[in-house]
Image: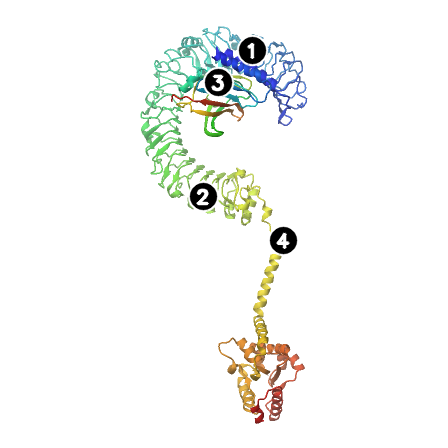
Amino acid sequence: MKISNALVLILVLLYISASTEWPTHTVCKEDNLEIYYKSCDPRQDFAFSIDRCSDIATHTFNIRAAILLRHSIKELYAKLNLIINGKTVLTYSETLCEPGLSKLIFCGKKKGEHLYYEGPVTLGIKEIPQGDYVVSAELTNEDHDTVACAYVTVKNYLDDY
Amino acid sequence: MPRRRALPLWTLVVLLQLVGCLLSPCLEVIPDKAFRCMGLNITGVPSEVPNTTQNLDLSFSNIRSLRANYFASVPELQLLDLTRCHLQTVEDNSFNGLHKLSTLILTGNPFQDLGPAAFYGLTSLKKLVLVENDITSLNDLPIGHLHTLQELNVGHNNIASLKLPKYFSNLTSLRHLNVFSNKITYISRGDLDVLKEVNRLNLTLVLSLNSIQCIEPGSFAKIHLRELVLRSSFENFHVMRSSLQGLTGLQVNRLIVGEFSDRQRLVDFQSGLLSGLCQVRMQEFVLISFRGFDNNTDTLFNCIGNVSSIRLVDLQLREISKVPMFSQVKQLECKKCKFKEVPARKLSLFKDLRSLRIIKSKNLNSFRETFVDLRNLELLDLSENRLSFSLCCSPKFHNCPNLKHLNLSFNADISVTGDFTNVKNLLYLDFQHTKLVGPGSYPVFLSLQKLIYLDISHTRTHVKSQCTFCGLNSLRVLKMAGNSFENNKLANNFKNLSHLHTLDISGCKLVHVDRSTFDALSELKELNISNNKLLSFDPVVYKPLQALTALDFSNNQLSVLLDSALDTLPDSLVLLDISQNLFDCSCVYKNFLKWIKEKQELLQNKESMICHTPTYVKNVTLSSFDLSSCQLNVGTVASSVTMLLAAVVFLFLIYKYYFQLYYSLVLLSGCKHSAERGDTYDAFVIHSSKDQEWVMKELVEPLEGGTPPFHLCLYYRDFLPGVPVVTNIIQEGFLSSRNVIAVISTDFLESKWCSFEFDIAQSWQLVEGKTGIIMIVLEEVNKALLRQRLGLSRYLRRNTYLEWKNKEISRHIFWRQLTGVLLEGKNWNHEQVKLM
């Protein structure tokens, strides 16, 4: 399935050429759960995948994400907004890299280097909210430059909760 | 390996970026000095970049190859960034002429052809970044001539061997060699021999994220490094243990061993893991991001007991391992560990300990044990845990006489007793953001006579006791922001703190400051009283603070600083923050606004000094307030002054000519009625009251009792009571009489009433042309005075007048004349005619 995901990505990437908007990538497309994302950084797209979409409902799941850094990330901050019907209803922020303690492997990377993360992510929520909604995610560095930015569209209609 | 699959994706992404990139002009970051020309499709240095440029960023451009003297047009360059420029070929002498270049970044270029003289000419190069360049061997790098190079970063390449080439002996300035994330598997004896040749006391070697299988013993023998970093460098526990044994003979200032929290390869800490470090001489040891300390941790300190400084960071360590006898550890730090209890008893075995930090441990909530016999302990930092305990602080320390710094900040809650006897030499005490029980209610700090720094900010302390800070006679710094005072009022709380230099009482809900509050603080240099609810700046309160250099009065409810307050501010003041107050920008406070303009250098956060009232200048900053709007318009002033003067003159005139005005009013009304009134009297006699006797005897009796009888109007007899005198004069006197007899005497001239009556008579004569004035001048009247007083002489000159003399003959003539005049125009009724 991962290979097929990658193939889809490659095809999509080949399809778009020089358009200014980045294409929408599919992360999950299962019976009840669909997740898509689209880069909102005008300068670049990035790659993202979830090993097993069904794991999202569990506490921790594995992701892979890769991006070419346009800015150094001595410090890295993540900010997530939950948007329902065009309105931000929830904001969450987290420090990923802070000066003095580079716990994560990619902290301290410089401009031009590849960032590849493969590992567990804990959302800290019991279940994925149901319905149609958008999560906007933005990573910024110590100079408030946008390192990565994405709109994640989630369609979740799991009935078994 | 998923990583391999990601790579083609990324090549595509990069390609797409390049396709999408349009030619965009360079951005001038610092005029003439720094230019950013990212994502260009170029074959040379952009022409718009001047030859004065020092920093040039050409990253993400499509350059592909560098030929000789490529950068000849920018000889002043100090930093050149060629990140991801698709450089495959760098010809010889490409950087020729860049004598001042100190930093060269070549990240992410897939070099295929690097000329042997590619870096010639870089005579000042200090930092060379060759990350992600597909470099397979250090031997291939043509950098042997870079004597000045201090930092070489060859991370994220495919270097398989740490065999340092011969040319490293030329790199005499090298201080930092970063070989992280390469393919190094074996470090053999002799690989680092080149480092022995030169004195390398200052070199930092980073070998993190390699997959080292083996370090041959002796590889690091007789090598002296400043720092060696081995994070996530080993495949598994056995490899790590045996490899660390290969460090035998190394001498290093700081050794960092461990992992990254998202790259954990080692499952568990097992006994003997660090046994190899017994053969390493080091000053500082850092163990970072290790999980699984469930068992067998007792050997943790075995080989590091002689190290003077140990840092344990982000470890799942639940208990302090067995402490070896005669340990020489002087500094110990446990950051983000898993202790539940402050392990004071075990830590007390580190007899040489000078500094102990147990910080940022989420599980640490209990402090029951006692530190015993740590005679050298000077600093104890237990901040940012979840500590909750009572009986602070003396019972926690036994025979720790040198403790000077105690940091218990950012914990849960601590109950402070007044007992500090065992730690009475404390100099620094920090409780901030920890809920405190004790301070404020009673004097708990009495025995801390030497303390110079106390921070009890945000500790929910409510200062009730006047003696809260008693005993702190040496205190220099007191920080207590975010607490509260009894009745929200500062009273005599600081009376004994005469050496205080810094006082922070911001956010204490203060409403009032008593006049004597700061009397003792003559040495105070910094005062932060911001974020309170103070309405005014009372000069008397702040007068004693003559040494003040910084005052923060921001975010209060101050409307203005009056002149007296401005005079109170000491000359030593360098920083003053009065932003976020409710300023009144009325022109009444022109002096204050003018002062603001003059003191721009002194004032902080000027953009937050905003007018609050009046409404038409709301949200205007004080600095941009237009003072000229307060200067009055000349025209307006002139007209208003004129108006005022006119009004004053008018009022004065009314006051002065009150009688005349009133008369003319009555006259006008009298005109209307004159026709209606009959000639009740033959004459109205104007006379002074002092001449009344003469009038009665010489005038009334003969005239009214004679034939024909005349009817005279006399004020004392005929005026109606209850009617104003003036009205009587007009109504009864003039309107009802045919003639007016004026008895002019000296008294007449002096009486005001008489002169007015005479005036009216004259005007009446003029208006009506009817009533004649018969003047009787009594003989003794001074003519000169008469002339002067009333202007009567003029009148007398024009008119005939009668003169009364006491001679019989004269009287006769007088009577004849008077009767004659009075008879004129008299309507005789029948009865009277008969009588004649």
* Amino acid carrying mark 2 in the image: Leu
Proximity of marks 1 and 3: CB atoms separated by less than 8 Å: no
Secondary-structure class at tag 1: loop
Residues behind callouts 4 and 2 on a single chain: yes
The structure residue drawn at horizontal position 56% and vertical position 84%, both measured from the top left corner, is B681
Q: Which mark is residue B134?
A: 1
Label count reads 4
Secondary-structure class at tag 4: helix
Query: In x, y percent, where is residue B268?
Result: 38, 13
* Amino acid carrying mark 1 in the image: Asp
Dot placed on the residue nearer the N-terminal end, 4 or 1? 1
Please identify the quadrant where the C terminus of chain A is shown: top left
* Amino acid carrying mark 4 in the image: Val
Task: Between residue B460 and residue B697, name the one nearer to us.
Answer: B697
State the colouring used for the structure image: rainbow
Proximity of marks 4 and 1: CB atoms separated by less than 8 Å: no
Is A156 left or right of B778, judged from the image as shown? left
Q: CA distance from mark 3 to mark 4?
A: 76 Å
Dot placed on the residue nearer the N-terminal end, 4 or 2? 2
* Amino acid carrying mark 3 in the image: Val
Q: CA distance from mark 2 to mark 3?
A: 57 Å
Query: In x, y percent, where is residue A108?
Result: 50, 20
- Label 4 neighbourhood size at 10 Å, few (<14), some (14-19), many (20+)? few
- Label 3 neighbourhood size at 10 Å, few (<14), some (14-19), many (20+)? many
Residue pointed to by mark 3: A27
Query: In x, y percent, where is residue B633?
Result: 62, 52
**In the rendered structure, the residue with mark 4 lies on which chain?**
B
Q: Which mark is residue B534?
A: 2
The answer, for residue A52, to whether it is visible in the render is: yes
**In the rendered structure, the residue with mark 2 lies on which chain?**
B
In this picture, is A76 found above or below B799?
above
Residues behind callouts 2 and 1 on a single chain: yes
